[in-house]
Amino acid sequence: MRFLARLGAPVREFLVFLGDQAHLVAQTVRYGLKLRLDQLGAVASQIRLQIRFTGLDALLLTCGTALLLGAVTLIQAFTQLSGLGARSYIGLLMVLIILRELGPLLTAVLVIGRSGTAIAAELGTMQLNGEVDALAAHGVNPYQYLLLPRWIGVLVAVFALVVFFDASALAGGFLVARFKEGVTLGVYMDSVRDALVNRDLLATLLKVFLFSGAITFHACRHGLAIRRSQTEVPQAVTRTVVSALVAVFLVDGLVAAFLYA
Amino acid sequence: MIQVDDLALGAPDGRPLQEGLHLRLERGEALLLLGPGGCGKSQLLRVLAGTVPPRAGRVRVAGIQVWPGEGALALAGRVRAGFVFAQGGLLSNQSLRGNVELPLRFAGASPAEARARAEAALERFGLAPVAGLRPHAVSAGQRKLANVARVEAFGPELVLVDDPLEGVEAADHGRVAGWLRDWIQDAAHTVVVALEEPGAFGDLTARRLHLSPLSPAEEPR
């Protein structure tokens, strides 16, 4: 019996976690829909802050990473596939590797590292200091003031970062193609355009929506679960990184399976 | 205004603090919660505010079921409540002015109206010079006064005050005590104050509820 209990405990914990996540999402949507026009100003200022922190402040890091990744992808392609006509696969490689998979995925990883951790630590500290209770006690709904703006802010920021990531990666790829193989911009862009299908756009939008939700609610859940001491804050941050990464990779796999399998 | 039935309170670590607590408070009434530290006064205030669930029992505020239920979320937008916390209770990423304005903005006040009411309240408690600073940059006494200013500006119908003079500098005791007297005398507000001893508030016309661990006994009016 003890063995069975030990076996069942993680499963139960996982189910409780899923239930908590579903509850947070449902409550945020529910109270988000109840937000009044005259409350929008207070919430909008929080959304702006979140977009600035998650999006604008991470723009240089994201673009730099993407530029290098795009360049490295084509350097490897030209090196490994030089005898197989790599030039004709430039667009396909960039679309398959960068736009379809790594763009949204690496953007999500960067956002988890920068913003997911920050959200968990911030909410955890607020919880410990009684700030969340103070909000609720004065009629400020924490779902509307804390969770909704973070979700919308992360959603907008992730969308913008994925666009910049893809553009920078394509730019990095083009620089390599231009200087290593003498490919012109027109040929390069035609090659990318030919490889792109509408499903790629749908997949990217779907991933942006699901990734941003997963990152925000994992961070909020772990942050708000802090109750007793400051030592729980780093633990919540670590849990956020691990569980959000697992969720993002799982979602990525599911989207690929549903849309491309 | 407040209806509490068969309430059981527990400490955050699960220790029982109170059992079988009953309480009725009409609109405009004031109640002093008296008792030694650790007997559950602050916890009772938090339960009434809807931020902490009780171990058992029912709580209704203005006819709205708070517990069992959604707690403060059930009251949001329906009952205007204000809480003067014993310590903390201010958003650390907002200035004192921002902290005072926020409940007003959420209650539907325009930015200009919220700013005017916040400025007036901060002025009343001598916080105008530090209104633009965040809580960590001011003294503990000023943080407590900002708590009071937030309630003053918000104008709630239910006011919960946890140890009104804790952390307040001696020079400001009269200011806070005077403010509390005004609010208790105003029939538009229902006020619950938690205190270890009546002290400076001994002459207040208010009901008293003495709490001692696990043996509540309400004094006659």
Image (cartoon, grey):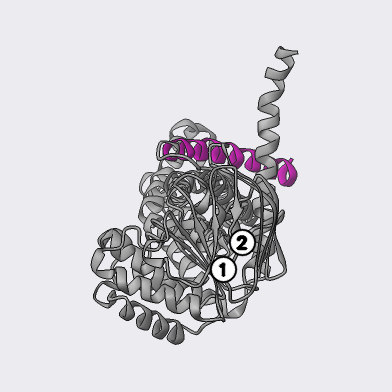
Q: In the displayed image of the protein, which residue is found farthest to the front?
A: B220
Q: Which amino acid does label 1 sit on?
A: Gly
**Residue B123, image x and y in percent?**
31, 80
Residue visible at 40% across and 53% down? Answer: A63
Checking the image for residue A139, the label placed there is 1
Q: Where residue A206 sits: x, y (%)?
A: 65, 54
- Residues marked 1 and 2 touching at CB (< 8 Å): yes
Point out residue B104 in the picture as x, y percentages from the top left corner. Answer: 49, 77
Label 2 marks which chain's residue?
Answer: B
Q: In which quarter of the image is the C terminus of chain B?
A: bottom right
Residue type, mark 2 in image: Ala
Residue at the disc numbered 2: B72
Res. B61 mark: none
**In magenta segment, residue B206:** no
For the residue pair B52 and B76, the one nearer the viewer reads as: B52
Residue in view at x 47 percent, y 66 percent: A46
The residues colored magenta run A233-261
Q: Does residue A50 sit above or below B206 in this rendering?
A: above
**Chain to which mark 1 belongs:** A
Name the residue nearer the viewer: B179 or B67: B179
Q: Can residue A94 be seen in this view?
A: no
